[in-house]
Image: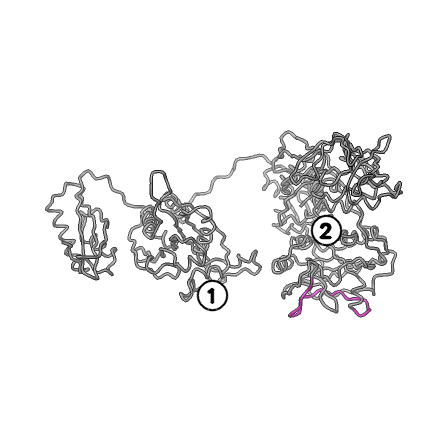
Amino acid sequence: MRVPVSWLKDYVDITIPVELLAERLTLAGLEVGSIEYLGVPQRHIEGVRWPESRHLVWDREKILLAAIREVKPHPNADRLVLAMVDYGGAELEQCVTGAPNLFDFKGQGPLEQPLWTAWAAEGAEVWDGHSDEPKRMILKEKPLRGIPNRSMVCSEKELGLSDSHEGVIVFFDQPCNQITGQPAAPGTPLQDVLGDIILEVGLTPNLARAYSIYGVAREVAALLGQPLRPPSYDVLMEGAPIEGQVFIEIRDPELNPRFTLALLRDMQIRPAPEWMQWRLMLVGQRPINNIVDVTNYITFEIGQPLHAFDYDKLVARAGGKPPTIITRLPEPGETLNTLDERTRQLEPHNILVCDTAGVLSLGGIIGGAETEIGDDTRNVLLEAANWNFINIRRTMQSQKVQTDAGLRFSRGVHPGQAERGLRRGIELMRRSAGGTVAQGILDAYPLPAPTVVVDLPVREIRRLLGLDFTAELAADILRGLQFEVQINGDTLRVTTPDHRLDIGDNIIGQADLIEEIARIYGYDRIPDTLIADEMPPQWTNVALVREERTRDVLVALGLREQISHRLIAPEREALLVPAGNGPLVQAGYVELANPLAADKTALRHTLLLNLLENARSNARYTARQQVFEIGSVYLKSDGQSLPDEPRRLGILLTGPRRVESWQHDEAAANMDFFDLKGVVEGLLNGLHITGAVYDRAEHPSLHPGRSASLSINGTPIGAFGELHPLVARAFDLPETPVLVAEFDLEALLDQVEDLHKTTALPTTPPVLQDIALVVGEETPAAAVEAAIWKAGGDLLRGVRLFDVYQGDPIPAGHKSLAYSLTYQALDRTLTDTEVAKVQQRIVKACERELSAKLRA
C-alpha cells in the first residue's frame, strides 16, 4: 500500500527522518519495500541503508509555485499561448506553452481567480516531456515561433510525478504550504507545496488494522511515542429525520453483522476538492467525482469501505415509496450487472445488497450499475456496512473480482468502524457537494461484536521475552497502541480496541499482546542469550535420516531435487491416463472448498503430474533433465475424516545421455529405459538394499513394452519406465523419450537395514569366466541371474549380463544371454578344477530350472 508521508502527518507528528521511520516500521512488522521521493532530496542516515534514488529533486530556487494571472494568444501560432506567470518576482514572466488545458482561458484578460501551477526557471533541471525514454534536460532560453521563452509551466511528467503530459499542472484552489499549513504564496518552493515521500508498505493478511493511512499512523504513533490525532467524525445534520425515508432488513446476520445508512439531499455532482484528488492520485486512485472520490478517500483514510447509491433511483424502483435495503443470499438464477460492466451469475454463497425490486450490489465488494452515481444525481444514500471476511474472500475468488473494498473486508474490518466511516464520509460529501444531511443514522446491528478483555501477568512477559519488563512499561506500550490497560498488582487487564481483530482471548490473547509489546519495544533491542535449561534427550528420527540419505544418493547419481505445489487440478492429473486405461488411483480427491486458483483445487494423488508439468516448462531452456521429488500424496480412505498421506519418490530423466562436449564428434544418444534402471539400481546400492526383483509392469502411464515394476523381498515398491506416448503428447512434451519412476518411499525405506555387512578387500586373485545360455525369449534375465547365484555358492562373487542375442543360429523363440562370472575365495587362490565344477553346477541348474542350454 502506498502511504504518502504528507497524508500521514495529518494524524501523527513524525519526529525522525523518513528513512529511519521506514526502518522502524519494517522491524515492527510493516515491511517498507521501497521509498518514492517526489521532488524532495533523499536523506542518508548512518546505519540505515536504502537504495540510492535516481529521482528528480526540485531546485528550491528554480522550481516554484506560481500563479497564472492571464493567458494571451500567441501572435504567430494557434496551438500556442502565452501564460503570464506570477512567480513572486517583480514582474510577470511570459511562458510560451501548448498546454491544451490553458486554451479555455485564452484572451479573457486578467483572470479573476489565478490558475496555480508549477513553474521552472531558466537553468532548472526537469524531465523531457516530449521524450519517450526517461531523459533529463536543463532549461535554456529559446524563442518559440518568434517569442522569447526562458522558463516553463510544468506538466506532471516534467516533474517526475507521472507520465501525464496532456496539460500543465493546474490548481483552481490556492495550495497550502506543508511546512506552515498556511496558503502558499507565489514563489514558494514547490518542494514545500507538492513535495512528498511515499512509503510502499507491504501488508500481510494479518495486518488488517494497517490497511489505511490512519492505521499506519497508529503504528507510527506507538513507535515514536507521539499522540495520535484522529479524523473528525462530526456531521452537520440539518435535514428531515432519516427514519421513514429508508428501511433496512438483514436476513443473515452471520454474513452481515451491521448495516448503516445516511442520506444527503440536494447535492451537486462536481469534481472533488483538489487536495482530495491529489491524495487519491498519490495512492494510485483515479479521481472521478466528489461523491465517488469520497467513498474511495474514506477507504484509504480509515479503512472502512463505503458505497453510494442514487437515492432517487432506489425510490423509483420502489414505486415511489421509501426504499427498503435488504441484505440476503441470492435466489436461484439471479444475476447482477456490476460497475465493471460485467453480468455476473450469482452463486449461493454470495451475500448481496438488494431492494424489493432486485439485486443492487455484491455486498462489500462491488456495486451494481443500475443505482450508480451519475452526473444527474441529486440525492445520495450512503452505505457503511460490515461483512463476514471469510464469505467476502470466498466470493472474490469465485466471482474473480478484486477491489480495494473487498481486499479490506476479506482481511477483517470491525463492525464498529461502520458508523465512523459513515459519519466521516457523509460530512465530506456535504462539504464538497453541498446539500443537507438527514438527521440521524439508520443503524441495523443484529450481531454486536464482543469486547475482548485479556488478563496478562507481567511474569509471562518476562518469561517469553527474557527481559525484566515492569508493569508500567508494558502498559505504556499497549496504551500507545490504543489498548485500554488497568494495572492490578502484577497483572495487566487489557481491553482490546475494536480495530484489533487479530488479538485473541485467554492464553492466545496473552501471546498476542506480548508480541505487540516486543515489536514496539524493538526486536533488535532484545539481547541474545544462551539457553539456560538442560538440553532434552536427543532421539534419532529414523524416517527423516533415511529420507535424507535417499536425497544424498540421488544427488550423487547426478539428479537435482525439485519441490512442487501439492495442490493440483484433477483434470490435469487425468491426462496421466490414456483414454480407456482406467484411473491412476481409485481414491477420490480431497478438494478445497475455497481454492486459491483454478489449477489448485485438490490435493494430489501422484508426483508424476508435477514432474511432467515442470519438465514441459524446463524443456524451453534445456534438453537434458535429471530430477527427483520426495513428497506426500493424499488418498481418501473410507471411514476416515482425514486422508492417508503416504510419501512417494518420483524420478524423471529425459534428453541426451551426456552433455555435449568438444571431445565428442557425434551427438549423444538420448537416455532410455536402461539409464533409468541404472539410477534405480544405484539408489538401491547406495541404500544397501538387496533382494530387488524387476518384472514387466502394467502401469497406465507407462509404455507397455518399456517399463518394469520393482519389488524388494516380496514387497511391491512401484513402477518405472518410458512415459506412454499418448501421455507425453497430452502434456506437450518433446519427442525425446521421457523416463519416469514413482515409488512408495515408505515401503522402500522399510527395506533399509540399520546395519549392513562389509567385507575386507580381497588379497587373492579372482577368476573370470564367461557363460552363454540359450533360453526361451519370454524368460526374464533376472530369473536366469537368480539361478546362477543360487547354484554358484560362496565362490561366486559377481554376475554381469554383457550380451543379449537373437538370430541365426539361435532357434526361433529363443535368445542367448551371455554373463561374465567372477569367482573368488578369500583364503586361497582358486584352481581351474574348482572353478570348472562350480561352472558345471551352474549350467545343470539352469538347464533343470529354466530349460536353458549352454550355447556352443
Residue with the most extreme left position: 833
Q: CA distance from mark 2 to mark 1?
A: 48 Å
Instruction: Tell me the residue at 66%/58% (across/down).
Output: 388
Horizontal side of 229 relative to 592 (left or right) equals: right
Mark 2 against mark 1, which lies toward the viewer? Answer: 2
Quadrant of the frame with the C terminus: bottom left
Is residue 743 highlighted in magenta? no
Q: Which residue is mark 2?
A: 299
- Mark 2 element type: helix
Q: How is the image coloured?
A: one colour
Residue 847 marker? none
Instruction: Tell me the residue at 14%/50% (across/down).
Output: 838
The answer to whether residue 476 shows anywhere in this view is no
Position above or below: 653 against 144:
below
Residue 67: x and y in percent read 83, 38
Look at label 1 and name its amino acid: Gly
Residue 854: x and y in percent read 15, 55
Q: Which residue is mark 1?
A: 639
- Mark 1 element type: loop
From the image, give the main secondary structure of the stretch colored magenta. loop
Task: Decide: few, some or many residues near mark 2? Use Cα within 10 Å; few <14, some 14-19, many ≥20.
Answer: many
Magenta span of residues: 318-337
Look at label 2 and name its amino acid: Thr
The answer to whether residue 701 shows anywhere in this view is yes
Front-most of residues 521 and 339:
339
Front-most of residues 655 and 681:
655
Front-most of residues 282 and 681:
282
Horizontal side of 108 relative to 772 (left or right) equals: right
Residue 65: x and y in percent read 80, 36
Is residue 321 highlighted in magenta? yes
